[in-house]
Amino acid sequence: MRTVSTNEAPAAIGPYSQGILINNLFYSSGQIPLTPEGQMVEGDAAEQAHQVFSNLKAVLKAAGASLETVVKATVFLADMEDFASVNEVYSHYFADHKPARSCVEVSRLPKDAKVEIEVIALVK
């Protein structure tokens, strides 16, 4: 088991890591729309989702994986009314490759983010 960490994504805001690599599987922690410097991206859920994907790409790269090797994604939304706009952003990043996915509305996300995404990816 190896802890994955990169300065290209925000540091964990609690007692957890950005991700864990076990054998050839990478498990990311949920990424919210914080910049690598720890500043919250303001704006709507779609704008926040772009930052979330930037963070995911960074931790995946640090693990030796990529969006193309994601096998499962879980999307957490503060408001299911944002489903269509976040789904549009999501489809931009997963255009040809479509991993399994769950999407749920939650009562609240850290730092009052509108979207959080975690992934499981294959490391080749």
Image (tube, rainbow, N blue to C red):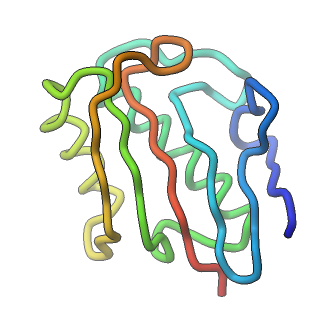
The answer to whether 56 appears left or right of 61 in the picture is left
Asked where in the image residue 114 lies, by quadrant, the reply is top left
User: Image point 75% across, 68% down: which residue?
Assistant: 21
Residue 122 position (above or below residue 6):
below
User: Image point 46% across, 12% down: which residue?
Assistant: 112
Question: In this orientation, which residue lies closer to the viewer: 19 or 34?
Answer: 19
Question: In this orientation, which residue lies closer to the viewer: 99 or 56?
Answer: 99
Q: Residue 92 location in percent, x, y?
A: 28, 55
- The quadrant of the picture occupied by the N terminus is bottom right
Question: In this orientation, which residue lies closer to the viewer: 100 or 51?
Answer: 100
User: Image point 66% across, 87% down: which residue?
Assistant: 124
Furthest-right residue in this view = 2
Furthest-front residue in this view = 107
Q: Residue 61 location in percent, x, y?
A: 68, 64
Residue 1 position (above or below residue 118):
below
The answer to whether 93 appears left or right of 22 in the picture is left
Furthest-bottom residue in this view = 124
